[in-house]
Image (cartoon, rainbow, N blue to C red):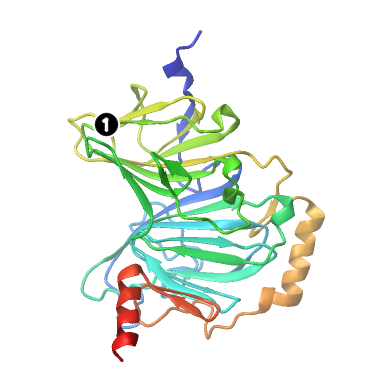
Amino acid sequence: MASKAKSAIRQIRSLGSGPFSTPEPFLFCVYHKDAYPEGDEKMQAPRMGNGQDFNPNAKWRMYHGSRIPGFPQHPHRGFETITATIEGIIDHTDSLKNGGRYGQGDLQWMTAGKGIVHGEMFPLVNMDKPNPTRFFQIWINLPKKNKMVQPDYIMHWAEDVKKVTSKDQKTKITVWAGELEGQKALEPPKNSWAAYPENDVAVWHIEVLPGGTYTVPKAKGGNTVNRSFYFIEGKNLEMNKEKVEPKSLIDVNAGVDLQLSVPPSASRSSELLMLQGKPIGEPVVQHGPFVMNTQQEIMQAFIDYQRTRFGGWPWPEDDYVFPREKGRFSKKGKKVEYPPKAQAEKKEEKVTA
């Protein structure tokens, strides 16, 4: 009989160079890491993109962008996107006339629902220094009953995002979704699968420094919950004292505690992403940016998009970005919000005006 420690790890495999394999209820996950150089006066990159620039061996990629890296307007239906940033800037625009600039630890959670068109561009705002970008784009499915809800999105500013630091100060965890050591993540959109506590959805970014050891507690839902780790940065990591190679995907038994450790001799910290959640347990039919339950629903999504364009595109360009001097902000309908410090300053300006 396998020991309790051994039974925690179910499978270890290579991450590969493309999008990561994800367990239900997740659909897709990619780790963007681009060492963008200085931008020009228009926040453009030094070279033009070819429309399909995903070269994993390059220092930076243009993706679908022409002169500014990113993803010009494109549609979604039937699921949610979670864009969890570590560094860099992203400009969001959508067919509901919402928009924003976020990054440096901010998180945007968008419910595509019955249909939305959005753009995600990475303007190179710094002209005097590089513009490195690191973030995760994660897709999480919606149950059938919520696939055709009204589109929605929530911005969680980095200053408000919950974090956990171990007692020895050698493990730092960002809690983008779920709960850890009494730190409950900020609320997801109301129709999200993550909005129901019994679904035990968690998205954590974990950094373990050299000499650090941390025990990830078992999930509340036990082994009825899927849990996967993605070893994205660093060279040294052990899970329950078993060595794990860099760039690995580790599927684990969520009903068992799991010890993470990095030896004191390691030259740098190790970073992991953890995705966890109860499976939705419904058929998944996906075609590009549409995720539904049947092929007929996928065909209807294409028909609806061709007919309505999900509200049309209200911005001047498909790859619209905001002016360089624009700081982090979020516009939803007529309401504009800013990170806590900037929000307080603007309130003070109104009082003294």
Question: Horizontal placement of 318 versus 237: left or right?
Answer: right
Q: Identify the residue at horizontal 46%, vertical 65% (top origin).
A: 155
Foreground residue, 233 or 191? 191
Q: Secondary structure at mark 1?
A: loop
Foreground residue, 44 or 110? 110
Q: Identify the residue at horizontal 28%, vertical 37% (top origin).
A: 166
**Residue 305 in which image quadrant:** bottom right
Q: Residue at label 1?
A: 262
Residue 348, how many percent across, how many down? Answer: 30, 81
The quarter of the picture where the C terminus appears is bottom left
Q: Identify the residue at horizontal 25%, vertical 40% (top origin).
A: 269
Residue 229, how many percent across, how many down? Answer: 44, 37
Neighbours of disc 1 within 10 Å: few (<14), some (14-19), many (20+): many
Residue 66, how many percent across, how many down? Answer: 46, 74
Tell which residue pokes out farthest to the bottom in this image.
353
Question: Horizontal placement of 243 versus 202: left or right?
Answer: left
Please count the marks in the image: 1
Q: Amino acid at mark 1?
A: Val
Q: Identify the residue at horizontal 53%, vertical 86% (top origin).
A: 316
